Image (tube, grey):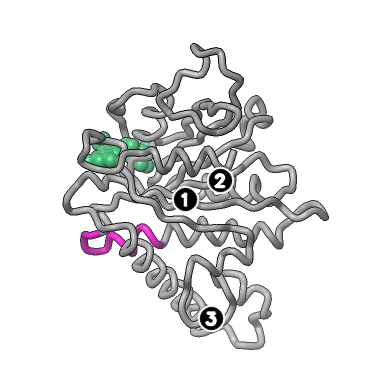
Amino acid sequence: LSGSTAYITLPSVLVVGPPGAGKTALITRLERRTPQPATTYTSQTLNIVELAINEDGTSKYSDDLDASGAVAKKFLMVDTPGHGKLRGATLARLASAASTAETKLRAVIYMVDSAALAEDGGIAAAASYLYEILLALQKRMSAGKSSKAPPAIPVLIAANKSDLFTALPATLIKSQLEAELGRIRTSRSKGLLSSGVGADDVDSASENDDWLGEYGSKAFQFGQMREFDTDVTVLAGNVVGDNGSGPGLDKWWRWIADKM
Ligand code: GTP
Ligand code: MG
C-alpha cells in the first residue's frame, strides 16, 4: 500500500481478517486463475498481486485478458497477515491510506471463516479485529489531511468456507457480528468511564473517539457506517471446494469489479 511507491498509481483492494480465513488462498487463486488455490502458509508479510478486469467490468476472474488482447483495467489486491501481533502495521497502513482524498484504496475485504464463526468464541474473535478496521475507516473522515473529503471506501465481509456444512449462513453472520460489535463499543465506553479517570479529565472528543457508528445509538448496525461513507455488504462464498459444494467466488468478484 503506501509503503510501496511502485504500486501507488493503481487502484487497490485491501484484504484483511483473522488468521486462517482464506485471504492468501483467495488472492493466489485469483492471480493464477486456477480452479483450485495453491497450498498456503501463515502469512507474515504483505502479499501483493496485480489483477485485471475488462473495461466494462464484466470479465470473469478466470478470463485471461492479456491473452485475449482486451483493454483491461488493472488493480492491486493486497493480502495481509491475520496474526494478532501483525495487525498494528495493517491498521496503520489503512489509516494513512484511507485518510487522503487522493487515495487509491477503493475497497476493503474483511474475510472470515464461516465455520470457525460457529465455534465458541469465533464471533468475538472476528468482531474485535473488524471493530478496529471499521473504526479506522470511520476516523479517516476526521483525520483528513486535505480540505477535500476522502472518497467512499466500501467493505465486503466475505463469509468464506461456505462449502463446509458447519458454516454459519451469511444472514446470521451479519446479525451476530452487529450484536458483538455493539457489545464491544459499549464495553469500551464503560471501560473508559470506570478506568479511574475522573469524568472531568476525559474530554468529550476522545471519549467519542472509539465509538463505532451512530453516537449514542442503542444497537450497532452496519448501516450506521454509511454516515462515514462506508457501505458494508456480507456475501457468502468459498475459495476451496468450488465443485458445486458452495457458491464459489463469483459474487465477490462481481462486487470487486463494481468498485474498480
Ligand atoms: P493468515 O495468513 O494466517 O492470516 O491466514 P489466511 O487468511 O491467509 O488463510 P489461508 O489462505 O492460508 O487459508 C487457511 C486455510 O483455509 C488453508 O488450508 C486453505 O486451504 C483453507 N481454505 C481457504 N478457503 C477455503 C474454503 O473456501 N473452504 C475450505 N473448506 N477451506 C478453505
Ligand atoms: Mg495468509
Q: Which residues are magenta?
A: 118-127
Residue at (34, 67) in percent of width and height: 176
Residue tagged by mark 2? 107
Identify residue type, mark 1.
Leu
Task: Examine the residues drawn in magenta and state their main secondary structure.
Answer: helix
Q: Nearer the viewer, residue 81 or 118?
A: 118
Looking at the rendering, which quadrant does residue 124 occupy?
Answer: bottom left
Viewport quadrant of the C terminus:
top right
Viewport quadrant of the N terminus:
top right
The answer to whether 132 is drawn above or below residue 83 in the figure is below
Mark 1 / mark 3, whichever is N-terminal: 1
Q: Nearer the viewer, residue 88 or 41?
A: 41
Regarding mark 1 in the picture, which secondary structure is present there?
strand
The CA span between labels 3 and 2 is 26 Å
Residue 217's tag is 3
- x, y percent for residue 46: 48, 34
Looking at the rendering, which quadrant does residue 37 occupy?
Answer: top left
Q: Quadrant of ligand 1?
A: top left
Regarding mark 2 in the picture, which secondary structure is present there?
strand
The CA span between labels 1 and 3 is 23 Å
The CA span between labels 2 and 1 is 8 Å
Q: Are marks 1 and 3 in contact (CB under 8 Å)?
A: no
